[in-house]
Amino acid sequence: SSIGRDMPALTMDEKDYDAAFHYDYESLRIGGLIFAVVLFVMGIVLIVSKSVGPTTVTVPCESIRPP
Protein backbone atom coordinates (compact mmCIF):
# COMPACT_ATOMS: atom_id res chain seq x y z
CA SER A 1 0.00 0.00 0.00
CA SER A 2 2.59 2.54 -1.13
CA ILE A 3 0.32 4.47 -3.51
CA GLY A 4 0.63 7.81 -1.68
CA ARG A 5 4.42 7.61 -1.43
CA ASP A 6 4.99 6.78 -5.09
CA MET A 7 3.18 9.85 -6.50
CA PRO A 8 5.05 13.01 -5.46
CA ALA A 9 3.61 14.88 -8.48
CA LEU A 10 0.25 15.16 -6.75
CA THR A 11 1.70 17.33 -4.01
CA MET A 12 3.75 19.45 -6.41
CA ASP A 13 0.62 20.82 -8.13
CA GLU A 14 -0.77 22.27 -4.91
CA LYS A 15 -0.18 25.96 -4.19
CA ASP A 16 1.88 27.01 -1.22
CA TYR A 17 -0.58 29.25 0.61
CA ASP A 18 2.00 30.21 3.24
CA ALA A 19 4.38 31.73 0.68
CA ALA A 20 4.88 35.50 0.60
CA PHE A 21 2.45 37.35 -1.66
CA HIS A 22 3.99 39.42 -4.43
CA TYR A 23 2.05 42.19 -6.13
CA ASP A 24 2.21 42.67 -9.87
CA TYR A 25 3.06 46.36 -9.55
CA GLU A 26 2.85 47.09 -13.28
CA SER A 27 -0.73 45.82 -13.47
CA LEU A 28 -1.65 47.71 -10.30
CA ARG A 29 -0.14 50.90 -11.69
CA ILE A 30 -1.93 50.56 -15.04
CA GLY A 31 -5.24 49.71 -13.35
CA GLY A 32 -4.93 52.67 -11.00
CA LEU A 33 -4.07 55.00 -13.85
CA ILE A 34 -7.08 53.84 -15.86
CA PHE A 35 -9.32 54.27 -12.81
CA ALA A 36 -7.97 57.79 -12.21
CA VAL A 37 -8.47 58.78 -15.86
CA VAL A 38 -12.05 57.47 -15.86
CA LEU A 39 -12.86 59.43 -12.68
CA PHE A 40 -11.20 62.56 -14.07
CA VAL A 41 -13.13 62.36 -17.35
CA MET A 42 -16.40 61.73 -15.52
CA GLY A 43 -15.77 64.80 -13.36
CA ILE A 44 -15.07 66.98 -16.40
CA VAL A 45 -18.21 65.67 -18.16
CA LEU A 46 -20.27 66.40 -15.05
CA ILE A 47 -18.95 69.95 -14.79
CA VAL A 48 -19.45 70.64 -18.49
CA SER A 49 -22.94 69.13 -18.55
CA LYS A 50 -24.03 71.35 -15.64
CA SER A 51 -22.78 74.52 -17.34
CA VAL A 52 -24.05 73.69 -20.86
CA GLY A 53 -27.43 72.33 -19.77
CA PRO A 54 -30.71 74.05 -20.62
CA THR A 55 -31.07 77.40 -18.98
CA THR A 56 -34.46 78.33 -17.56
CA VAL A 57 -35.50 81.93 -17.74
CA THR A 58 -37.88 83.01 -15.03
CA VAL A 59 -40.31 85.68 -16.10
CA PRO A 60 -42.46 87.25 -13.43
CA CYS A 61 -46.11 86.57 -14.00
CA GLU A 62 -48.21 89.71 -14.54
CA SER A 63 -51.38 88.16 -13.12
CA ILE A 64 -49.93 87.66 -9.65
CA ARG A 65 -49.47 90.99 -7.90
CA PRO A 66 -48.77 91.65 -4.28
CA PRO A 67 -51.71 93.26 -2.42
Image (tube, rainbow, N blue to C red):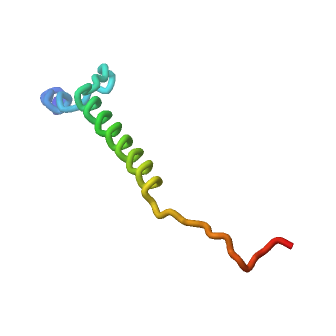
Quadrant the C terminus occupies: bottom right
Q: Position of residue 31 (x, y in %)?
A: 29, 36
Is 5 left or right of 64, judged from the image as shown?
A: left
Does residue 1 appear anywhere in the picture? Answer: no
Q: Whole-percent x and y of residue 9?
A: 13, 30
55 relative position to 10: left or right:
right
Q: How many marks?
A: 0
Residue at screen point 32% across, 39% down = 37
Q: Quadrant of the N terminus?
A: top left
Residue at point 29%, 21% (across, down)? 19
**Camera-nearest residue between 13 and 46:** 46
- Return the x and y of residue 17 as percentages of the image width and height: 31, 27
- Residue at image coords 23%, 27%: 26
Q: Residue furthest toward the top?
A: 20
Near-viewer residue (16 or 40): 40
Question: Looking at the rendering, which quadrant does residue 30 occupy?
Answer: top left
**Quick one: which residue is furthest to the right in this view?**
67
Residue 36 location (% of width, % of height): 35, 37
Q: Nearer the viewer, residue 57 or 26?
A: 57
Residue shown at 24%/32% (left/top)? 27
Specify the quadrant of the image occupied by residue 16.
top left
From where the camera sits, is residue 41 visible? yes
Residue with the most extreme bottom position: 63
